[in-house]
Amino acid sequence: MNTETDAVWVAELRKLLEKDGENAFYPDIRYRRSTPSTNDWLKEAVQESLEPAQETVREEQKISDADEGTTREEQRISTAASDTASGKAAEGTVVIADEQTAGKGRSGRIWVSPSGRNIYFSLLLTPDIKPEKATALTLAMGLSVAQGIRTALSLPAYIKWPNDIIVNKKKVCGMLTEMEVRGSQIKAVIIGVGINVNQKEFPEEIAFKASSLMLEKAAGDASPMTKKAAGDASPMSEKTAKTADSCEKELSRAEILAGVLTAFHENYKKFLETENLEGLKEDYNALLFNVGRAVRIEDPKGAYTAVSRGIDEKGRLAVEREDGSTVLISTGEISVRGLYGYV
């Protein structure tokens, strides 16, 4: 029996964070099942795997369908904000789901979230900063995910600006940050992250650019920087295709998430020191895919080609146009792609 299923791996995560001294910043890890379960042994296994003096993992049922006129996301943010205000949820609270039935990305895009295969978590933050500075936290998390994957698996994880994570030019992670603001004060920032870990198949419409850490680990650890031109956007590399049906050993979700959360804690402290990415931009740019290369800027006002030069302290991507001028691109409606495909 595979014991790293459901909440058992979350208990392992807690132990890893305690070992690294991160339990102080992540005081509450909550686990949500996607559906009610009668597996009482699971709850017992979780509790028994924790030290009696340590904090326990809470099991919660999924959020019920939102009331008419209120989206799930709005309900989630509102609940987090009220929990924070009432003391029910502290900064650093992590909520982990086994699956998502309504996962979404930017612009309402669907995020495929099968059960028992991947990492889906939301992190609650309450930074004492101006709301306009909070967008940089998404880039800080993107850096943390890339670093965590590298630490846990020694895979060449890179960042596609602003916060997609790619391995061997395939997207393995996406994230979305939402915020509750009252007046000029942040009540809650929630960073939602989905990491494809042990997933073997993807819908046809995204198979050309999506993959999982298991598939890319099985395909080999060759850096994307050593492969052929960044324009290669084949549906699946030959090596990955050969291993897709032969992957047997699942990767440890606990080790990967522990690596991500440990990296984020350190990056978050650096962020709060300056309230921007000044202390992180060097590390970020070192893992930024296509830096120094020509990219395609998809601007609603007109697409153009430029060379990526890295981010500034606000997380804006500096690109050099053909006439030598530099443009700073903010996250939002503008997207950056490789000249011949996704990267």
Image (cartoon, rainbow, N blue to C red):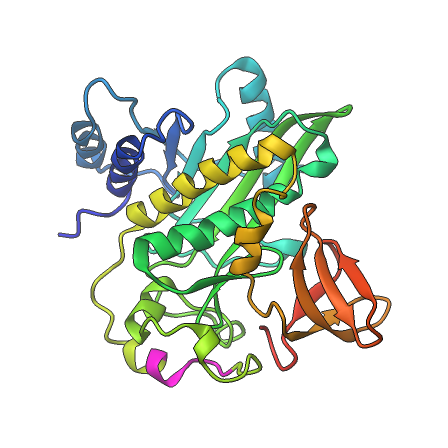
Residue 12 is covered by the magenta coloring: no
Image point (47%, 41%), residue name: 264
246 relative to 317, above or below: below
- Where does the image place residue 208, in percent across and percent down from the top left? 50, 77
Residue furthest left in the image = 1
**Residue stretch in magenta:** 234-240
- Where does the image place residue 196, in percent across and percent down from the top left? 41, 59
- Where does the image place residue 41, in percent across and percent down from the top left? 17, 35
Asked where in the image residue 200 lies, by quadrant, the reply is bottom left
Asked where in the image residue 19 lies, by quadrant, the reply is top left
Given residues 1 and 125, the one toward you in this image is 125
Residue 239 is covered by the magenta coloring: yes
Q: Is residue 64 visible?
A: no
286 relative to 232, above or below: above
336 relative to 58, above or below: below
65 relative to 221, above or below: above
Image point (80%, 73%), residue name: 303
Residue 51 as seen in the image, left or right of residue 33: left
Given residues 90 and 153, the one toward you in this image is 153
Image point (52%, 52%), residue name: 283
Quadrant location, the C terminus? bottom right
